[in-house]
Image (tube, rainbow, N blue to C red):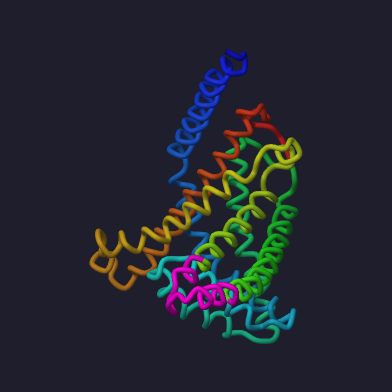
Amino acid sequence: MAVTDLLQPEKRKQLQAASLAIIREVAANVLTHGGVVAGNFAYLALLSVFPFFIVAAALGGVFGRSEYGAEAVRGFLAAVPPSVASVMAAPMEAAMTARTGPLLWLAVLVGLWTTASLIESIRAVIRRAYGTESNKPFWQYRLGSMALIIVAVIATMLALSVQVVLAGAAEVIANSLYFPGESWALVAMSQLFTFAVLLLMLFLVYGLLTPLRYREAGHPIWPGPVFISFWWMLCLAILPRFLATFANYDLTYGSLAGVMVSLIFFFLIGLAMVIGAELNAAIARARGGLPQGTKTD
């Protein structure tokens, strides 16, 4: 028997042991502070989603694509459960058209500052996971978060442009294969596109907010965004069925039921953000990353 054949089971055991150690570390850290962090994320997400799309509408107008603001809202509403979308649709559309001229740009500045708080919350989640501390002044990070929001808005516009092409391609494929009008191909393409946009945005955010020393060392960033994207799509599929079958929030919260469901959805996404950050950090430490408590960028 070859030496490599003898070593193969040992390598598998080492890989299994390392994987179990990573899972235990992630689970322990998430159980310790995941709920508190996810709750904070849910609040900031609900607070920031309206200002984000005000910024998107204003920047779309600058680029001569004012319709992209409404399209971005539709894309977001397609990526949340129907009960969440029904609560947010009308207020979001109203918020985007309520201001013009100087008031619009004042709202954009306020929106950038408010949405930057959510980015800073994600940065704090990632830094807590890696056990690193900041060594830059607050205003530098805040300006960086605002710049990241603008990049995210532009990326959203590009994604919407691609979506038009993909939707047309899916329709051509469906017609050429003689599928019915509401074909599975169109549905699958829509879900695949939503997943791809989520993954792209999350990879962008995690790639820019992960401490520089870990990025330069070549530690993987993709596991966290991939996990969050799958978790997001799972919540999108399961949460409406759960609410319809097991929970009736109308009886408990009355007219606030829609808001509570929105907070629950964002809480679940916030929990995934924590797990994704802890997963990346645990993998980095398993590969010999920096010890916790390191001062970094």
Q: Is residue 38 above or below residue 174?
A: above
- Quarter of the figure that contains the N terminus: top right
Q: Is residue 53 above or below residue 266?
A: below
Q: Quadrant of residue 10?
A: top right
Q: Is residue 174 magenta?
A: yes
Q: Main secondary structure of the magenta part?
A: helix
Foreground residue among 198 and 59: 198
Foreground residue among 215 and 181: 181
Tell me what residue is drawn at x 43 percent, y 53 percent.
268
Q: Is residue 239 magenta?
A: no
Q: Is residue 38 above or below residue 71?
A: above
Q: Is residue 95 above or below residue 143?
A: below
Foreground residue among 123 and 18: 18
Tell me what residue is drawn at x 63 percent, y 33 percent.
284
- Quarter of the figure that contains the C terminus: top right
Whole-percent x, y for residue 2 in the image? 61, 14
Whole-percent x, y for residue 6 in the image? 56, 15
Tell me what residue is drawn at x 40 percent, y 60 percent.
237
Whole-percent x, y for residue 13 in the image? 51, 21
State the count of labels: 0
Foreground residue among 243 and 261: 243
Tell me the magenta residue range. 168-188
In the image: residue 149, left or right of residue 258: right
Tell me what residue is drawn at x 49 percent, y 52 percent.
230
Whole-percent x, y for residue 106 in the image? 67, 77
